[in-house]
Image (cartoon, rainbow, N blue to C red):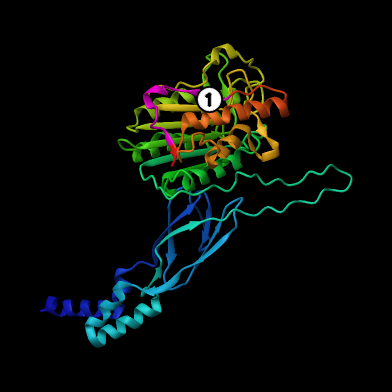
């Protein structure tokens, strides 16, 4: 008899509590992606980064505003609308008791959800004003590069994945890799908007987000979890390169790299290519705006080391399905292009993707075609403006991939 009276009592308590109060949590999940990725989203006093689509826990019962910021882009505020959640209507099935439950749901705010629950926000580049020259000084104007606004394609490549890295400042007091942060941000824009990679397939790692563990995570795990047969991979790195003078092995220098212990803190190109070779991808394109000679520019080495450049005549190993465009030869410097606020090779890479590399005017840009455009341009500017030699390198088995490496169409 006690059991029979207990069950209705529990039922009444539940009804009085309200369906939504019982079934719904205090927050609702909203998925946010930005183009380009790597923005910061602020909501409910918390900060989230959109390196890839991020889930935001939004408090029910409010009409919250998500504030989005990214260096070089206009900030945006996105206001979510409040709506009734599905569970609240369950109260109406219970007549009088249900009305009480409905009131409980409204007071507890569990009756509400938000709309929309999936957001894709396209960020707008800032228009940088031209600065006025300082009295008594040369006319040093703030320069806005002509390649910073990518052209857009309607061709979406769902089977394409990219990791874009830019390290301009380092944890240790090392020289800046000038414009590397801007390089990576703009390249990520081009990958999404010009090459047609879905934003959720593009990982952008900049400065402190490009530690050695970050490179390991995205090069080795993130790609392995996403890439399937016949997919395409695009890797871009802008920052300092270095090498072990004893072994001749070349390294990307992560944000937390230590030149004295480069074998432990650098990310080896041999390691990168070994992992890329293991993936089932059809094509891999790697672009390195760095150098590995120890001679200066976008290259660093420990003070106690002397470069043995004859041991790094080929700074990367690229065979099979992988094609590499490197910024310079093994004994050369990879320069920044101050007039254009980008790495020298990156500037002409972007210029080429903007349409100038379409030499045969067929509406497509293949990797060999892109290289044939940028190589003489880089050589010319390096010689005329910096009185140095910089000859980009194209490495890999081009014959086996001839006609298949289409970057833009």
Q: Residue at x 54, y 15 (%)?
A: 313
- In the rendered image, residue 235, in percent from the top left (x then y), is placed at 47, 35
On the question of residue 362 being in view, the answer is yes
- In the rendered image, residue 58, in percent from the top left (x then y), is placed at 44, 64
Near-viewer residue (307 or 213): 307
On the question of residue 174 being in view, the answer is no
Image quadrant occupied by the N terminus: bottom left
Image quadrant occupied by the C terminus: top left
Q: Residue at x 74, y 51 (%)?
A: 130
Task: Provide the secondary structure element on which disc 1 rests.
Answer: strand
What residue does disc 1 label? 251
Q: Decide: is 306 above or below 387.
A: above
271 sits to left or right of 91: right
Count of residue discs: 1
Q: Quadrant of residue 389?
A: top right
The magenta segment is 392-406
Near-viewer residue (352 or 397): 352
158 sits to left or right of 122: left
Q: Decide: is 137 above or below 63.
A: above
The reply to whether the magenta stretch includes residue 116 is no
User: Among all residues in the image, which is located at the extreme front?
Assistant: 361
């Amino acid at each position: 008899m006690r059991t029979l009276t207990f069950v209705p009592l529990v039922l009444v308590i539940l009804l009085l509590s309200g369906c939504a109060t019982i079934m719904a949590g205090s927050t609702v999940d909203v998925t946010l992606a930005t183009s380009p990725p790597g923005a910061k989203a602020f909501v409910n006093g918390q900060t989230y980064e959109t390196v890839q689509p991020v889930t935001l826990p939004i408090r029910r019962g409010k009409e919250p505003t998500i504030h989005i910021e990214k260096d070089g882009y206009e900030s945006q505020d996105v206001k979510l609308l409040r709506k009734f959640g599905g569970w609240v209507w369950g109260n109406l099935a219970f007549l009088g008791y249900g009305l009480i439950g409905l009131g409980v749901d409204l007071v507890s705010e569990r009756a509400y959800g938000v709309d929309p629950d999936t957001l894709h926000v396209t960020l707008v580049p800032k228009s940088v004003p031209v600065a006025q020259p300082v009295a008594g000084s040369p006319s040093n104007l703030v320069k806005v590069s002509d390649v910073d606004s990518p052209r857009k394609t309607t061709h979406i490549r769902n089977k394409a994945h990219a990791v874009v890295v830019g390290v301009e400042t380092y944890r240790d007091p090392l020289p800046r890799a000038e414009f590397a942060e801007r390089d990576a941000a703009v390249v990520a824009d081009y990958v999404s908007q010009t090459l047609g990679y879905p934003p959720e397939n593009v990982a952008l790692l900049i400065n402190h987000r490009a530690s050695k563990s970050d490179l390991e995570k995205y090069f080795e795990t993130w790609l392995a979890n996403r890439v399937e047969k016949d997919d395409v991979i695009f890797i871009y790195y802008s920052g300092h390169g270095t090498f072990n003078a004893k072994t001749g092995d070349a390294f990307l220098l992560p944000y937390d790299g230590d030149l004295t212990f480069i074998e432990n803190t650098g990310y080896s190109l041999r390691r990168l290519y070994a992992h890329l070779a293991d993936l089932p991808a059809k094509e891999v394109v790697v672009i390195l705006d760095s150098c590995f000679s120890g001679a200066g520019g976008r290259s660093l080495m420990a003070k106690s080391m002397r470069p043995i450049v004859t041991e790094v005549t080929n700074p990367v190993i690229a065979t099979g399905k992988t094609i590499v465009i490197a910024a310079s030869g093994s004994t050369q410097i990879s320069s920044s292009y101050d007039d254009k606020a980008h790495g020298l090779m990156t500037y002409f890479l972007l210029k080429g993707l903007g349409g100038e590399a379409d030499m045969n005017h067929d509406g497509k840009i293949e990797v060999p075609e892109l290289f044939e455009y940028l190589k003489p341009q880089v050589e010319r500017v390096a010689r005329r403006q910096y009185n140095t030699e910089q000859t980009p390198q194209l490495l890999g088995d081009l014959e086996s991939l001839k006609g298949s490496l289409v970057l833009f169409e």
